Amino acid sequence: MIRRLLIAAALLVVATPLFIAILPAIAADIAFPALTGRVVDQAGILPPQDVAKLTIQLAAHEQRTGQQVVVAVVKSLEGQPIEDYGVELGRFWGIGQKGKNTGAILLVSPADRKVRIEVGYGLEGELTDAVSSTIIDQVMLPHFRQGDMAGGIVAGTGQILRALGDDVPVTVPPPTRRQQEGNGHGSIGSILFTFLIFGLFIWLARRRGGGIGSAILPFIIANSWSSRGGGSSWDSSNGGGGGFSGGGGSFGGGGASGSW
């Protein structure tokens, strides 16, 4: 009998660390979306202008306060309770500053008709469970029940930031000069100018009997003009580059949930 107890105890000692070690792997079986930005719309329900507005507002909030707030609209909760999914998603992404845990996630799953505000340890004193519940019940759910998913998410995000002491309105900066030229008459003017230069050099080459150097000179001129931005509407300020990531924060289950 004593021998069996010793064997059982030994197995328990060996198995416990193994079980703890595979817990992250169990969580990893959930297909969490990649953290592609401050707004992750896996379900594709937010118009581009709303994504842009929210991204700018959330970035400005983090710059002022150091707090990371992320909006996540997922296709499915993978059969998990939204409370479990939310806390694991927050840990997976590492939202919030490491050590301070100043992160929050507005999580919405339209397919499951569930919404949650997941709050990091460091923000539980400001974005309390009661405040989170009020934002969901009184601000977001009325929009959702009328089929206005985007409106509910935008309004809810604004209220979350207000609860965290930020009352700055959502604004979108005006397009840069290069963007305006690329999208308007500046682009047409650049093309006409390039063709004018091209025709001029072809005419000069024929008059002077120039060789191949004169023939390829227009292409060099045109390429040089394009490389200076005359024929391109892309600008790095459009946000084409990535760079956003979680700060290593953690979550303990604070927040509130709702359904419609």
Image (cartoon, grey):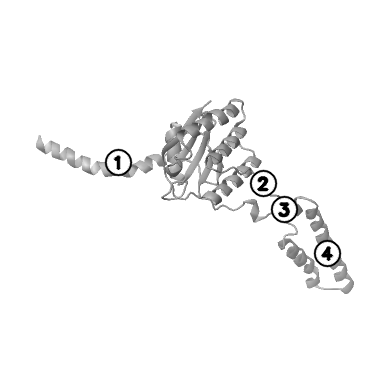
Disc 3/disc 4 C-alpha distance (Å): 24 Å
Q: Specify which label sits upstream in the sequence, 2 or 4.
A: 2
Q: Nearer the viewer, residue 11 or 69?
A: 69
Report crowding for label 4: few under 14, some 14 to 19, many 20 or more residues within 10 A (C-alpha): some
Please state the horizontal and vertical placement of residue 77, each as a whole percent of the image: 47, 33
Amino acid type at circle 2 is Val
Tell me, for residue 179, which label it has, or none.
3
Disc 2/disc 4 C-alpha distance (Å): 38 Å
Disc 4/disc 1 C-alpha distance (Å): 72 Å
Closer to viewer: mark 2 or mark 1: 2
Please state the horizontal and vertical placement of residue 83, each as a whole percent of the image: 44, 33
Disc 2/disc 1 C-alpha distance (Å): 49 Å
Report which residue position mark 1 lands on: 19
Whether residue 89 is visible, yes or no, is no
Q: Specify which label sits upstream in the sequence, 2 or 1.
A: 1
Report crowding for label 2: few under 14, some 14 to 19, many 20 or more residues within 10 A (C-alpha): some
Report which residue position mark 2 lands on: 172
